[in-house]
Amino acid sequence: MIEIKNINKTFGDRQVVKDVSFTFHKGKTNLIIGESGCGKTTILKLMVGLHKADSGDILYDGQNFPKLSVNEQENIRKKIGMLFQGGALFDSQTLEENVQFPLDMFTDLTKAEKLEQVNFCLEKVQLVGKNKLYPAELSGGMKKRAALARAIANNPSYLFCDEPNSGLDPKTSIVIDNLIRNITEEFNITTIIVTHDMNSVIEIGDNIMFVHKGENWWTGDKSQILKTKNQELFDFVFASEFMKQVLGSQAK
Amino acid sequence: MNLFFHIGRYFMLLYRVFARPQKHSVYMRQIIFEINNIGISSLPIIAIISVFMGGIITIQAAFGFNSPWVPLYAVGFTTRESIMLEFSPTIVCLILAGKVGSNIASEIGAMRITEQIDALEIMGINSAGYLIFPKIAAAVFIFPFLIALSMFLGIAGGYVMGITSGACTEYEYIFGIQAFFEPWKLYYSFTKVLVFAFIITSVSAYFGYNTSGGALEVGKSSTSAVVYSSILILLFSLILTNLFLNR
Ligand SMILES: Nc1ncnc2c1ncn2[C@@H]1O[C@H](COP(=O)(O)OP(=O)(O)O)[C@@H](O)[C@H]1O
Ligand SMILES: [Mg+2]
């Protein structure tokens, strides 16, 4: 479980994150949704420490991340897996080396044990046999799945995903969403997904925070979101006439 | 102001680069990879340039020394001194600044803008140490060998081209390259090489590491890396020359 309490972040003279508090639950797919530029990625980066919050608490199962020593922060980071928007696979390494990388760095497993774990992860993301390919040889969807395999390689307790299905076709998006949900439930991970894809919201939105202009504007789950009376959220969810017709009929 | 900002941030980066390695076996593997990537792959260009420059210096020296007062062994002597003191340590390092420096800056810059560095940080890895330390260590280790080879090939090139072009005789050249040899000058040359190896890799890595934006900025970082490491090489060449040779 991760709790964030009253976090603020200013870039220059623009306050991008305003007093945001929320609780992300274990074994659930927790979503941060909102329109582009509302501050979703910034919240994610604040949580993992890539940005430093101006104020506020970030509690990883009770431990206040910003207040910890560098060593203690590193220990928490070893339990974090992160799927970046662009995949962020290491270009100079093969798929296998990419997935094995966290194991090389942080475990004392033998070569055979590492390979076993790599193949286990590749199987989870349906990339068996692609071990020796380089990132440049993979399609967009395969890159995302490969990055997911790397993110889960070292058995993380927390999984962060920044727009896991941006730039993917609807069918591949659903595959990725389901993979993330299955992994979350199977390994009982605290998963946080940033998205603006309504399909994902309806599919896997166990626990949702809607961010508007840097503020926590609305919280709820996928069944509540379609019945919302909140104007900004309504505009976000029912952005198109098509959505209004399809989702509107479901909501009734 | 801007200059002090860069200097401060450069030393802060170095502080992280030399933090205790997290996993020695991984660092060792990277160093060996970089020795190949930075060093061995530069062999062809160094070989070609050194042979030709040696030949050209020899012929030019012979052309200049046609007065009867200058002994002909001065050709070999001049070639050796030029190559050993300045051409191989400084000019070859300037060429390596272009090749290796732009390579390092664009590699690390691309990793920055595609969030690969963020990915390392998230895993709890000291990205500066992991990415930059092996490059510095590899360059400091391999550059002296490359430059020694450059010296040898330069003098050999002078021999071949000097004699085949008739600029001097074999005896004069061989006598010349052995004349008045002072071994301590090699200290001076190789001290320069070690300093330049450090400058090229660390300055280029600094520009790559602090890239922000997109592909265009990666290109700019790469250019800055070459320009600033070249200027620093010349500056330190001057400083070290004053320290060693100015008596
Ligand atoms: N490093 C940064 N420096 C300055 N401004 C930033 C930085 N990162 C993000 N921003 C600004 O913060 C706002 C929110 O960005 P972001 O969190 O990436 O939005 P989202 O992920 O919701 O699309 C944007 O207006 C962006 O311009
Ligand atoms: Mg974003």
Image: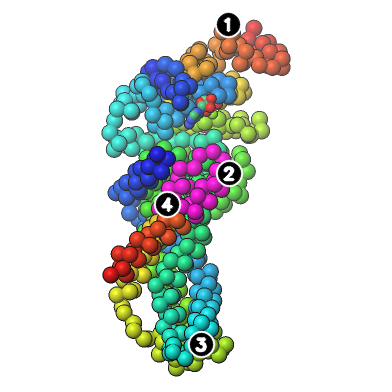
> Badge 1 is on which residue?
A229
Residue at figure coordinates x 39%, y 63% from the top left: B237
- Name the front one of labels 1 and 2: 2
How far is disc 2 from disc 4 in space, using C-alphas? Answer: 20 Å
> Badge 3 is on which residue?
B66
Give the main secondary structure of the magenta stretch: helix
Q: Nearer the viewer, residue B34 or B24?
A: B34
Instruction: Point out the tag, 2 or 4, that comes first from the N-terminus.
Output: 4
Residue at figure coordinates x 42%, y 70% from the top left: B86
Which portion, as a residue range, is magenta?
B201-228
Quadrant holding the C terminus of chain B: bottom left
User: 10 Å neighbourhood of mark 3: few (<14), some, or many (≥20)?
Assistant: few
Q: Are marks 3 and 1 on the same chain?
A: no
Residue B205 included in the magenta stretch of the image: yes
Quadrant holding the N terminus of chain B: top left
Q: Amino acid at mark 4?
A: Val
Image coordinates of residue A163 in percent, x first then y, are 55, 30
Residue at figure coordinates x 32%, y 46% from the top left: B15
User: 10 Å neighbourhood of mark 2: few (<14), some, or many (≥20)?
Assistant: some
- Name the front one of labels 3 and 2: 3
> Badge 2 is on which residue?
B215
Q: What is the image's colouring?
A: rainbow
> Badge 4 is on which residue?
B203
How far is disc 3 from disc 2 in space, using C-alphas? Answer: 55 Å
Per the image, label 4 sits on a secondary structure element best described as helix
Q: Look at the picture and state if B77 lies above or below A201.
A: below
